[in-house]
Amino acid sequence: MGRIAAPFGVLGWVKVQPFTEKINGLLAFPVWSLGRGEQWREVKVLDSEAHHKTLVARLDGCNDRDAAAALKGLEVAVPREALPEAPENEYYWSDLIGLEVVNVQAEVLGKVAELLETGANDVLVVEGERERLLPFIAQVILKVDLAAGRIDVDWDADY
């Protein structure tokens, strides 16, 4: 849902770069999970607000600039079950990670490793025999089947 970008001030506040469509999407959650890879911990949010194109937050146990600086680079998440259902034909990025990507020739291109926001459209990073970058647009993404763990695409394996 976001990443801690930097300390904010000297009292332990952090600046958060949100990954959500709406800047204030994280403000509704009283507890955030902070971490990366396999190491995560829950932290109570004592105060938070939108600040320009970022968020600033005061987290429990983070009382000075040094403590805030130690959190720089950590990802911010909330429990999946706490999020509302995505509208039809929209998906949470976390739901797409790990899905198998198959083209119209039934060739497996790999699995979604991550997504990138480019401004024009989101991009799937698909890792298989090699890395591929596929635009998440209707002309390329034919079907997303979360239950089957699969995304069907119109994308040549040689491209």
Image: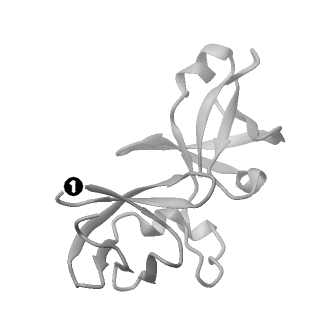
Q: Quadrant of residue 126?
A: bottom left
Q: Nearer the viewer, residue 107 or 47?
A: 107
Q: Nearer the viewer, residue 120 or 59?
A: 120
Q: Is residue 30 above or below residue 139?
A: above
The answer to whether 150 appears left or right of 115 in the picture is left
Q: Quadrant of residue 49?
A: top right
**Which residue is depicted at the point 68% across and 16% down?**
64
- Identified by mark 1, the residue type is Arg
**Which residue is depicted at the point 22% across and 66% down?**
158
Q: Nearer the viewer, residue 159 or 73?
A: 159
**Which residue is depicted at the point 65% across and 50% down?**
31
Q: Quadrant of residue 130?
A: bottom left
Q: Is residue 30 above or below residue 87?
A: above
Q: Is residue 90 above or below residue 120?
A: below
Query: Where is residue 122 drawn, in percent x and y?
Result: 54, 60
The answer to whether 92 appears left or right of 38 in the picture is right
The answer to whether 52 appears left or right of 118 in the picture is right
Query: Where is residue 157 drawn, in percent x and y?
Result: 24, 69
Q: Quadrant of the C terminus?
A: bottom left
Query: Where is residue 54 drawn, in percent x and y?
Result: 74, 39
Q: Secondary structure at mark 1?
A: loop
- Say which residue label 1 marks: 130
Q: Nearer the viewer, residue 139 or 27?
A: 139
Query: Where is residue 78 drawn, in percent x and y?
Result: 58, 56
Q: Is disc 1 surrounded by few (<14), some (14 to 19) or many (20+) residues within 10 Å?
A: few
**Which residue is depicted at the point 62% across and 85% down?**
88
